[in-house]
Amino acid sequence: MAMLLHELILEQASRCPDAAAIVHRQAVLDYADLARRVQSAARGLLALGLKRSERVAVYLPKQLETVVALFAAVAAGGVFVPVNPQLKPEQVGHILRDCNVRILITARARADRLLLDPAACPDLRALVLVDGSGAPPDNHPLQAAHWQELSAAGSDPKPARAIDIDMAAILYTSGSTGKPKGVVLSHRNLLAGACSVAGYLDNRADDRLLAILPFSFDYGLSQLTTAFVAGARAVLMDYLLARDVVTAVARERITGLAAVPPMWVQLAQLDWPAEAADSLRYFTNSGGAMPRATLNALRRRLPKAVPYLMYGLTEAFRSTYLPPEEIDRRPDSIGKAIPNAEILVVREDGSPCEPGEAGELVHRGSLVAQGYWNDPEKTAERFRPLPGQNPALPLVELAVWSGDTVRADDDGFLYFIGRKDDMIKTSGYRVSPTEIEEVLYDSGQIVEAAAVGVPHPALGQAVVGVVKPLRASCAEEDLINHCKLHLPNFMMPLHIVIRQADLPRNANGKIDRKALAGELRDLFSESDA
């Protein structure tokens, strides 16, 4: 049984060396080849001076080198930090600085756009380029290597010893205030989550999982880890259109497909060829509630595919799923706890809620992360002692307090009600309103700004900016163009409302985002989807 994350690949290489592990376009790596590449790249990272628990950032789209780099980092005793390829240089720079990245693996064009300033990224020591010249940017004394050089390193030195509670990954997730926070995940966290999910999905060696979500998203990374638990293959894809996904399902005979609600809304509107509908064994949803009409349309188009509706948060990977046999009776439920996790619904004082009573979802178990990187204050807010612990236990167990309000029915099935904070949930992403507001203020054209989430039939929530302009000539188009320069697509405001009056404030004198969201609740109708 694997104790460390990369050992999933090594075990499958021993059991089924010739089985396909990764498919990207025309290239196929079997488990034996993937294991060799991971071990070679790990030796290369050690040769670059990577020490135990140091961070390796991987800033690439989904391709073979991305997968190898992630698992090579942990094989070398380090920690991988997958960076969403959609992020702009400002967001990437924040991640590199925040978790003190030592080695960055990326492509030449991406490295050039980052403008790696030694003052801004003082801990960065090495740059590995998967294409083009190996020379580093002129403005940084980086040790440089090309991917081929990294993969051709010799047999020494050896990685430091690691155990299952050591750090394996840091995944960045937005908070309601400030910059994204790095969620620290151990080998145990990732392995326990992969085994649990692969278990209730009944993943097996003949499965073919289509990976369309970014690996910086725990739900996207799960497509790799659950495939490797089962000895299945993961097919990597960065799609342009929903139609491309359907085509890939048919071409690759995909058996498992994971997506977020906005993608499912699009996929439900398409005609699926018989070969695609016949191959798909199951589909999963997380990152927000799937509209009931969308679920019904998918079940009509994919009668052989079993739907799994799930709920999760990066701080605990995955929390609940709705067994498929319950969907007709409880289509709005997020289900019950996944195997090897316990989900509690509690009042503010930590006491358990009665059935039907709204409370905060609290997750306990081996999937609970190790906190937020270098942020003890925010860690203490979200990772708190488990309510109702036996006072005789000398050590306090910490649980994740999700910030989500839910209720349980008489049978223990959970239903999502809303969030306690101002986070915006759009296209499967959690987006910080503060980050968007900072970009709006940086335009120099406004005196007040608020970003809110407004119900949207396709996106779950749409990002809407509300601003008070500095001058009457301020135009929405100018602000949108400014945001495009500094925000990734999923964080872009769909609309910016310009008001001449002051924005509303709450009792504490802060801009009242909830009041604004309520005013704009009906901004988008079904016809706008």
Image: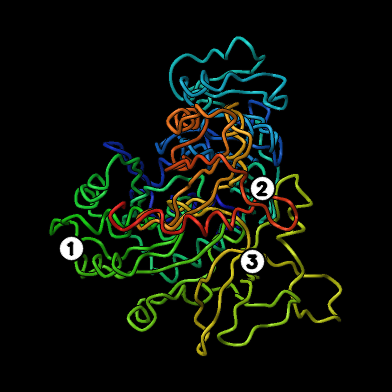
How much space separates mark 2 and mark 1, taking CA atoms? 45 Å
Query: What's the residue type where badge 2 is placed?
Result: Thr
- Crowding at dot 3, Cα within 10 Å, few <14 / some 14-19 / many 20+, comes out as some
Query: What's the distance in space between the residues labelled 3 and 2, CA to CA?
Result: 27 Å
* Element on which disc 1 rests: helix
- Identify which residue, 330 or 229, lies in the foreground: 330
Instruction: Say which amino acid is labelled 3.
Output: Ser
Question: Of callouts 3 and 2, which one flags the residue occurring earlier in the amino acid sequence?
Answer: 2
Which residue is pictured at 35% across the width and 40% down the height?
238
Vertical side of 51 occupied by 502: above or below:
below
Q: Is residue 224 visible?
A: no
Identity of the residue drawn at 50% across and 29% down: 474
Q: Earlier in the sequence, mark 1 or mark 3?
A: 1
Q: Is residue 59 left or right of residue 188?
A: left
Quick check: 3 above or below 416?
Answer: above
Secondary structure beneath label 2:
loop
- Identify residue type, mark 1: Asp
Whole-percent x, y for residue 393 in the image? 83, 77
**Eye-nearest disc, 3 or 2:** 2
Report how far apart the C-alphas of labels 1 and 3 lie in the structure.
36 Å
Q: Is residue 295 left or right of residue 358?
A: left
Provide the secondary structure element on which disc 3 rests. loop
- Mark with earlier residue (2, 1): 2
- Residue receiving disc 1: 278
Q: Residue furthest bottom?
A: 410
Within 10 Å of disc 1 (Cα), the crowding (few <14, some 14-19, many 20+) is some
Query: Could you tell me which residue is drawn at 49 percent across and 81 percent down?
Result: 413
Q: Residue 366 carries which label?
A: 3
Residue 164 lies left or right of residue 208; in this view the side is: right
Residue indicated by mark 2: 177
